[in-house]
Image: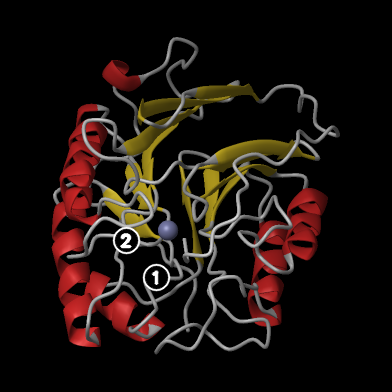
């Protein structure tokens, strides 16, 4: 499996236009912006657990429209693009519907695997449907490096698929850890990580071997932020100088309260997260690796029997 995906961006190049440059971004600076959303859970299901599945696609349309207005360089969906259907074929149809909306964005798109993406489907089914060939991979743009991780593996190393897993049992297996260590060693570019399950908690929403993964990220000295989903209330903490941002889910809350997405601006000085809908705006200076050794309390943690 080739995990180095370097598809040429369909649109636009990394060159920033003045329209979307934050004030502190000078020409030739390492500036970039991208769109983010998580936990769409598109499905033809009645409301349950505060999830408004039938409103999810329209919320995605709004996200895509905002990304287009912001002229993002690329966009990332952080997993659980779809929810369950009676058959694998029906789940595949949901995936095609959701991807058709995401594909309206005239920019490069990235997909993080979530536990619901590979419930009835296999990873290969999912990847083929969206025209991708790897579930974890790296790419570089405008002097930044991005790593897309796949934590949809059971603790025994088996990949999720064909209804074989419990959503609380997530792990990044040894082969992916080796790949990650290699990727973090070959470049000194500032690095951003995307993953569905959380790497900053030890709760049921976290990756089972998150401490091991964090050690790799921390020892590299180049990872500045991790963007994740899975826990629908969202959350934030900083561990050892790395910012962990959990996006609020698209699917929860009735309209007009529902919907959550973000446009992230990267500059040499800061990460600026512009929140839309239920997603808060956040900003982190990058210069001095702030605060870093003090961890804030885990946020957004709750007991939830339904799989997120
Ligand atoms: Zn979810």
Ligand 1 within 8 A of label 1's CB?
A: yes
> Which x, y percent locates residue 238?
72, 36
- Horizontally, residue 36 falls left or right of residue 218, namely left
Q: Give the distance between the C-alpha atoms of the residues marked 2 and 1, in whole angstroms.
A: 8 Å
**Residue wearing tag 1:** 116
- Horizontally, residue 121 falls left or right of residue 201, namely left
- Horizontally, residue 22 falls left or right of residue 145, namely left
Q: Residue at left 67%, top 81%?
A: 155
**Do tag 2 and tag 1 residues touch (Cβ < 8 Å)?**
yes
Q: Quadrant of residue 12?
A: top left
Query: Which residue is at the front of the view, 140 or 240?
Result: 240
**Residue wearing tag 2:** 81
Q: How many marks?
A: 2
> Which x, y percent locates residue 67?
26, 35
Q: Secondary structure at mark 2?
A: loop
Q: Would residue 242 be visible to someone looking at this image? A: no
Q: 24 above or below 183?
A: above
- Which of the four quarters of the rendered structure image does ligand 1 lie in? bottom left
Q: Quadrant of residue 304?
A: bottom right
**Which residue is farthest top?**
23
Q: Secondary structure at mark 1?
A: loop
**Which residue is farthest right?**
293
Q: 142 above or below 104?
A: above
């Amino acid at each position: 499996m080739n995990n180095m995906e370097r598809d040429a961006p369909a649109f636009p190049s990394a060159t920033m236009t003045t329209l979307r440059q934050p004030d502190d971004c000078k020409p030739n600076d390492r500036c970039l912006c991208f769109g983010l959303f998580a936990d769409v859970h598109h499905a033809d299901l009645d409301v349950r657990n505060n999830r408004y599945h039938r409103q999810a696609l329209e919320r995605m349309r709004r996200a895509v429209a905002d990304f287009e207005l912001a002229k993002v360089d690329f966009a990332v969906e952080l997993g659980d693009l779809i929810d369950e259907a009676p058959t694998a074929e029906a789940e595949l149809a949901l995936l095609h519907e959701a991807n058709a909306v995401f594909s309206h964005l005239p920019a490069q798109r990235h997909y993080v695997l979530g536990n619901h993406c590979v419930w009835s489907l296999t990873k290969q089914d999912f990847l083929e449907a969206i025209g991708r060939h790897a579930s974890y991979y790296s790419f570089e743009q405008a002097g930044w490096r991005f790593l897309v991780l796949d934590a949809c593996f059971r603790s025994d190393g088996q990949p999720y698929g064909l209804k074989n897993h419990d959503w609380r049992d997530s792990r990044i297996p040894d082969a992916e850890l080796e790949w990650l260590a290699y990727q973090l060693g070959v470049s000194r570019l500032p690095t951003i990580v995307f993953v569905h399950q959380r790497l900053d908690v030890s709760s049921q929403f976290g990756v089972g071997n998150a401490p091991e993964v964090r050690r790799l990220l921390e020892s590299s000295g180049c990872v500045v932020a991790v963007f994740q989903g899975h826990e629908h209330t969202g959350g934030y903490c900083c561990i050892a100088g790395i910012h962990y941002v959990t996006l609020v889910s698209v699917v929860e809350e009735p309209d007009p309260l529902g919907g959550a997405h973000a446009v992230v601006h990267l500059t040499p000085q800061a990460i600026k997260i512009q929140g839309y809908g239920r997603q808060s705006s956040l900003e982190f200076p990058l210069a001095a690796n702030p605060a870093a050794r003090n961890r804030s309390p885990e946020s957004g943690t709750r007991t939830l029997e339904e799989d997120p």
